[in-house]
Amino acid sequence: MTREELQKASGIIGRSKAIKDLLDVVLQVAPTDVTVLIQGESGVGKELFAKAIHLASKRADKQLISVNCGAIPEGLLESELFGHVKGSFTNAYSDRKGYFEIADGGTLFLDEIAEMPITTQVKFLRVLETKEFMPIGAEKVKRADVRIIAAANKDLEKEVKAKRFRSDLYFRLKAVMLYIPPLRERREDIILLAETFLRDFSRRNNAKEIIIDHSGFNALVSYDWPGNVRELKNVVETAATLSKTGILTAEDFEPHFTQESVTVEQPQNLPVHLKRQSNDLDRELIYRALIEIKKDLNELKAIAKNPAQNSNATVEVTSEILPLKELERRAIKNALQQTQWNKRKAAKLLGINERTFYRKLKEYGIVK
């Protein structure tokens, strides 16, 4: 199986070097039965890489069972993994196979492995080492030939140091470790992902083709995506659902972002992300307002010194000290007047992003 074939079969979308390198590692380790630990932030696509490992393995004709350890209550996880016999606990009305037994001959993917209770970790480690387990309430040991792939969005090394995860299990799991980088570290994949999600959305909903304009692409690429691919898909599909024109712009995406980001124009129109704290943005706005006020005062003083040139003008020069918030409000109104109340242009003129600008409009009650 080639890298391209594996990428298509598993649904992994990306053309960045990071994704290509990861797929090469998958092709190398998949034919073995070595345990793989996949780490990365929430939403980066860890389950897709587990699927890719399974599809490229000798177990591809068997089942891939996915279990989210964080979604199963602590008291039930052991039963879900190892099974139980009738009468072993309340409501155990019949024998039940666990995921290890169901996945026999195939692959078991354990997501959010860091959420596994310490007591269950002990039994899980034994299964990894001996391939033997005992259902709850059973008297006989069972065996299962299962390839284990685990995933975590927490740093397991830190969890070990905090005594929340067993060190022996951690070292047993990390025989091979894959780290899936977040979207902000592989921005070249964002446009490809967004276009793919749009095509899928249009196909599923029998909708006309929806496109993204230049400002829309700039907004997507400059945003940090704390929720990664999952968040990107949600934002794209939400914007597509609410679109009235069939053309998605920055204004369609930015209201759905959960954090602020600023795009700085560079040569060749390459979007570059400059992350600023809100205090920095407010300070910049204040500085710009002060510069504007100082400029206006200098012009008034010049007029006052030459009244003959402005005989019809009534000039009053004041040394009044205004609060910073009033300076902000005046700067915003001045920018709006200069741009005929075009909010996007006004925000650009002030050097702040639109989300901060709209927040300031609301804060100062500036409406037209």
Image (cartoon, rainbow, N blue to C red):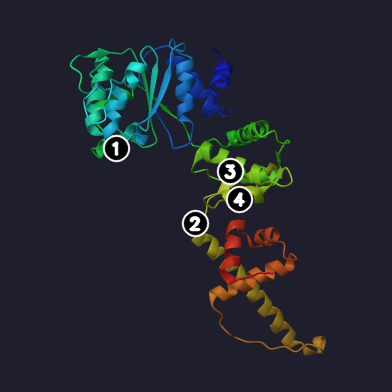
Mark in front: 3 vs 1: 3
Instruction: Count numbered badges in the picture.
Output: 4
Horizontally, residue 70 falls left or right of residue 276, namely: left
Of the numbered discs 1 and 4, the one sitting upstream in the chain is 1
Of the numbered discs 3 and 1, the one sitting upstream in the chain is 1
Foreground: 206 or 91? 91
Residue 355 in view here: yes
CB under 8 Å between discs 4 and 2: no
Q: Secondary structure at mark 1?
A: helix
Q: Secondary structure at mark 4?
A: helix
224 w.r.t. 200: above or below: below
Mark in front: 4 vs 2: 4
Residue 277 image label: 2
Distance CA(mark 1)–CA(mark 4): 35 Å
Q: Which residue is mark 4?
A: 254
Of the numbered discs 2 and 3, the one sitting upstream in the chain is 3
Q: Which residue is mark 3?
A: 235
